[in-house]
Amino acid sequence: MQKGETLIDTAITLNAMRPDLLVVRHHAAGAVELLSQKVDCSVINAGDGAHQHPTQGLLDALTIRRAKGRIEGLTVAICGDVLHSRVARSNINILNTLGARVRIVAPSTLLPSSPDRLGAEIFTNMKEGIKDADIVMMLRLQRERMEGTYVPSSREFFHFFGLDEDKLQLARPDALIMHPGPMNRGVEIDSTVADHSRSVIREQVEMGVAVRMAVLETLARHLPNR
Amino acid sequence: MSRPRATAFLNARLMDPESGLDKPGGLLVEDGIIADMGNHLRRNAPKGADVIDCNGHVLAPGLIDCQVFTGEPGHEHRETLATASNAAAAGGVTTIVCMPETEPVIDQVALVDFIRRRARDTALVNVHTMAAATKGLAGAEMTEIGLLKEAGAVAFSNGKSSIQDTALLRNVLNYAKDFDALIVHHTEDPYLSRSGVMNSGEVATRLGLPGVNKLAETIVLERDVRLVEMTGGRYHAATISCAESIAVIRHAKKRKLPVTCGVSINHLTLNENDIGPYRTFFRIRPPLRGEDDRRAMVTALAEGHIDVIVSSHDPQDADTKRRPFAEAADGAIGLETLLAAALRLYHNEEIDLMRLLRAMTINPARLLGLSSGRLQEGAPADIILIDLGQPWVVDKDGLKSRSKNSPFDEGKLQGRVLHTMVAGKSVYRYPAGKRG
């Protein structure tokens, strides 16, 4: 792709090597879908633009289930730059499917259009959105988004939408803290809170390995011509 | 600081634009608030109170002026908060909202705090800040609207220039909505108005001056209303000046959009003919329009389509004004003449007094979430006593503003503030030294 080759040409070239499985991450939504139409093998979406990151959704759900024993009926608050987040979209999908109550917490400028159609309760006030939540899932806010177009400054974002000790108190006393990483300490999450005893951020990473092994294994078991 | 004693206003015509009260009576001020009012106080003051005999004159809430430019910080030689407050007190304006167009621009929490403390220490009247909506008023990046509001900013504006980046203005409205912050916007297309110095039309042609078509204002207003429709954010058109803009506002209100608008006293009482022989005190922004538009503004105000009257007080010194018209700065002072000029409309029977006062008291109070602007028990004692009929001639050098660019200079006005009280403290009396 670096040499100016089109995505389709890349797909055709890769296909000619007869891979068993492809894992593809791309900055444009829909690119993985497009590529998968041009190859004969299974394609695993490792994240396409702001669209989906399915394995992240799986690993987040697994982390929650292992820590809480269930997913159904839990209140999950997904907080931060939802507009640009494939992690948010995948999590809303899987958590709704598994029966959780999903909330989105973000300033209006970081909400996608028609947010009410996503199947989550929308909050533009974090104190209200995080109240009595079982899970607080923080999303990363990219540098370029905090300079004054979507959000005036990281200081303001952290004050109103960052997870700090004060706001954490509003969630349930046994609430879990999650983050897909990498974290911007002091922007969306207070440094101390990131290292909190109820943070399962490290477990998420560990479950990520397990989930991806499982996905690869499941697909490998069903290869044609085996 | 010692607590002011109780003050009793006797024998007044009590007017409260919020409730519509217009009755003879008296009013008692204690501890900075209106403690009691009504007919029972008309003649009798409680023991120990300072007594002021109103001689039947109107006792009303002090005026709230939501567009005042000062030179503090940065251009103190033009006007400080102190001198602006002197002018305000003499004009019966008990609350001023200062614009962010200073040097530096009020776009940081620390600067909102500076204004608050400076006003507390030097100003006679209440001072609030309208903070910048974009950093440096450059129209490129949003300011910390949430933090600025927490620090006390009552609204947000881009000063004298319109935000051109449509996506940015949409984001500002969207973001401000989460904080219930009001966006006040000057509507003027900079490309269309780039070289114009007055309203385009016959007068500009005869004077040989480049004009700006009034639609330069309406175009931006229409766009802005669509952005309000898109986002639901609260929006206030700072100073509209022509009939076409009124039509846009009426349509927006009919659709129940959160849109309000203000008009400058200059566009209610003056027109482009007043420029006469290139008099630069009449160079303002938006420019003075034709008489038809002036009348349209008056009618719109009388019918309730315009919410707020502002002075748009803008001190400019001889440096910037004593030049050929096309090179002069725009701006006219108006704090001290706001009420008397507005009363012209009352004396001409174009607007009833209650509606006039409403646009300068309770309407701005509601827009900005202030508890003043009301003559009611429990309200702050921001009160003015008005002699509706007293004639006077404006002498610019006698005005209290540090700058003297008044378009009413040598004008004959009818109506004068006799007494101004802010938070229970008397800050102005006319004639000076008169008591009771």
Image (cartoon, grey):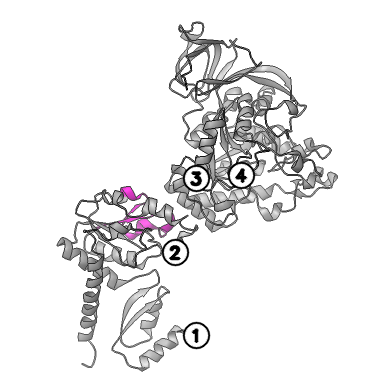
Most extreme residue toward the front, as rendered? B1
Pinpoint the chain carrying mark 1.
A
Task: Tell me the mark number nearer the camera, choosing from 3 and 1.
Answer: 3
Is the residue A31 above or below the residue A200 in the image?
below
Q: Secondary structure at mark 1?
A: loop
Provide the residue designation for mark 4.
Answer: B102
- Which chain's residue wears label 2? A
Chain of the residue under label 3: B
**Mark 4 neighbour class, 10 Å CA radius: few under 14, some 14 to 19, many 20 or more:** some
Circle 2 is placed at which residue position? A143
User: For mark 1, what is the residue?
Assistant: A4
B172 or A38: nearer the viewer: B172
Give the Cα separation between the discs numbered 3 and 1.
Answer: 50 Å
Is residue A85 visible to us here?
A: yes
For the N terminus of chain A, the image quarter is: bottom left
* SS at badge 4: loop
Q: What is the magenta range? A: A101-128
Image quarter of the C terminus of chain A:
bottom left
Q: CA distance from mark 2 to mark 4?
A: 30 Å
Q: Secondary structure at mark 2?
A: helix
